[in-house]
Image (cartoon, rainbow, N blue to C red):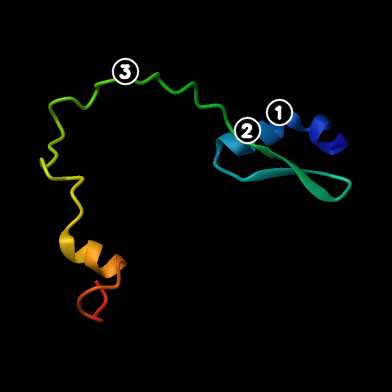
């Protein structure tokens, strides 16, 4: 940990270059150093409206699947 404090700027540069930086404390992994890429943009509800189509029977379970769960019909896997 002390070494990481001393060389934090160099470790930060290495993280920005894509290197995986793990800081240890008492010989055990303690921190994972990642570059800050900025906050994610907040999503608006309805952002995909008009772009996605869903079948009217999307949530209707087919009868053969129901039968399989109930142990009826063929012994073949569904």
Point 60% across, 44% down: residue? 19
Nearer to us: label 1 or label 3: 3
Which residue, given by chain and number where applicable, does mark 2 sit on? 13
Callout 1: SS: helix
Disc 3: CA contacts within 10 A as few (<14), some (14-19) or many (>=20): few
Which residue, given by chain and number where applicable, does mark 1 sit on? 9
Nearer to us: label 2 or label 3: 3
Q: Position of residue 38 (x, y in %)?
A: 49, 22
**Depicted 41 relative to depicted 74: above or below:** above
Callout 3: SS: loop
Q: Position of residue 32 (x, y in %)?
A: 68, 40
Looking at the figure, which quarter contains the N terminus? top right
The first of marks 2 and 3 along the sequence is: 2
Q: Nearer the viewer, residue 24 or 5?
A: 24
**Depicted 78 relative to depicted 33: above or below:** below
Q: Nearer the viewer, residue 32 or 45?
A: 45
Callout 2: SS: helix
Which residue, given by chain and number where applicable, does mark 3 sit on? 44
Marks 1 and 3 sit apart, C-alpha to C-alpha, by 37 Å
Marks 2 and 1 in Cβ contact (< 8 Å): yes
């Amino acid at each position: 940990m002390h070494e990481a404090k001393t060389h934090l700027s160099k470790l930060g540069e290495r993280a920005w270059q894509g290197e995986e930086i793990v800081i240890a404390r008492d010989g055990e992994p303690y921190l994972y150093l990642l570059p800050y890429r900025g906050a994610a943009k907040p999503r608006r509800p309805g952002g995909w409206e008009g772009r996605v189509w869903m079948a009217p029977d999307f949530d209707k379970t087919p009868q053969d699947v129901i039968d399989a769960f109930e142990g009826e019909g063929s012994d073949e896997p569904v």
